[in-house]
Amino acid sequence: MSVPPVPYDPELEPGLAAFLDLVERIPLRADTILANRAHFATIIPPVEQMVGDRPVDLTEHTVPGPDGAPDIILTVVRPRSGAAGAPALYSIHGGGMVLGNRFFGLDGLIDDVLRFDAVGISVEYRLAPENPAPAAVEDCYAGLLWTVEHADELGIDPSRIVVTGASAGGGLAAGVALLARDRNGPAIAGQLLACPMLDDRNESVSTRQYDGIGAWDRNNNDTGWNALLGPARGTDAASPYAVPARMADLSGLPPAYLDVGAAEIFRDETTEYALRIWATGGQAELHVWAGGYHGFAGFSPDAEVSRSAVAARLSWLRRILRTG
């Protein structure tokens, strides 16, 4: 039975149109992943442009990957005024598991580095389908291990590291938190999961409401999960670290911040993940933003709901990091 979609907030509609014009020019299907990657690369501004005249220093670190896997690259962002013992934001980029690189979203990470006098770390992980699960989440976990092991030289307080990500990055951040719990560390102060990609089953009401419409629709989601999981998709063989919604036990996790638009496919799986954390006695803060499309705050920053979403995210970070 077809279900009508939740209407978009009218103030967000121009931003959604710009998003679709810029990002969704080529439908994402198995045979268009490479073309989409090439297009995606053109919409990520040069690093020099993102930094501008802001007082930060960027360094590149090639670090050990998972056992038997290639090394990975981390971009580290530090404020020039920073002191030792800073909080850290370990950032995992989005892109549906198949697109993007560590510079996607770097401008926002720089903003937060300066807001919180923090150190930002952006990880380059292997993309599907060339590198199926669990390559991406294992790369992200390996980068976190290196970050903690080198906390002193990076000027980081290892007790104040938040793992963050949006969309696919949000799903990977959730997977990293699960790996850290089940491998006895490192300790994570919090997990910030923005419109996270958590469930390969793609069968919720919200996925069906945005089948063929929206900034990331049900068909794109099928493409991303098929690329990541291959024949394991939809079966018990799918790793719960790659598909956090499949993890049976969500107890013992660091505090979570989850936010999502009411008018996007990830609404229901994000809400369910928060409910399941609460059911274990865990800490979660959930925001479902009325009329919000996928990634609305980035493309419609001046809308009232976007300003509210940004304020809520920053409030949670201040509480977790105990700054300001």
Image: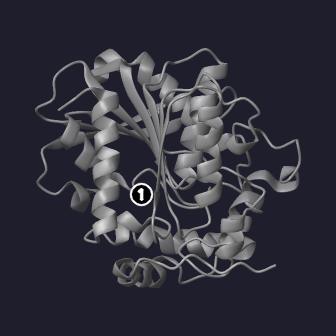
Q: Residue at x 83, y 53 (%)?
A: 233
Q: Is residue 235 left or right of residue 207?
A: right
Q: Which residue is mark 1?
A: 104
Is residue 152 in view from this perspective? yes
Q: Which quadrant is the N terminus positioned in? A: bottom right
Which residue occupies the foreground of this view, 176 or 7?
7
Task: Compare residues 14 and 7 and report the one nearer the observer.
Answer: 7
Q: Residue visible at 73% across and 58% down?
A: 225
User: How many dots with numbers?
Assistant: 1
**In the image, residue 304 above or below residue 288:** below
- Tell me where residue 22 appears, x and y as whole percent: 43, 80
Tell me which amino acid carries mark 1.
Answer: Phe
Compared with 16, 41 (above or below) is above
From the viewer's perspective, tell me whether residue 241 is left or right of residue 289.
right
- Left or right: 51 in relation to 261: left
Q: Quadrant of the C terminus?
A: top left
Residue 138 seen in the current view? no
Percent x, y of residue 65: 58, 31
Q: Residue at x 54, y 60 (%)?
A: 95
Judging from the image, the colouring scheme is one colour
Q: Is residue 238 above or below residue 252?
A: below
Q: Nearer the viewer, residue 19 or 310?
A: 310
Question: For residue 237, what is the image quadrant?
Answer: top right
Residue 229 screen position, x and y as percent? 78, 52
Q: Secondary structure at mark 1?
A: loop
The picture quadrant where one finds residue 36 is: bottom right
Q: Residues within 10 Å of mark 1 (few under 14, many from 20)?
A: many
Q: Nearer the viewer, residue 143 or 283?
A: 283
Position of residue 248 relative to residue 209, above or below, is above
Horizontal and vertical percent for residue 221? 68, 65
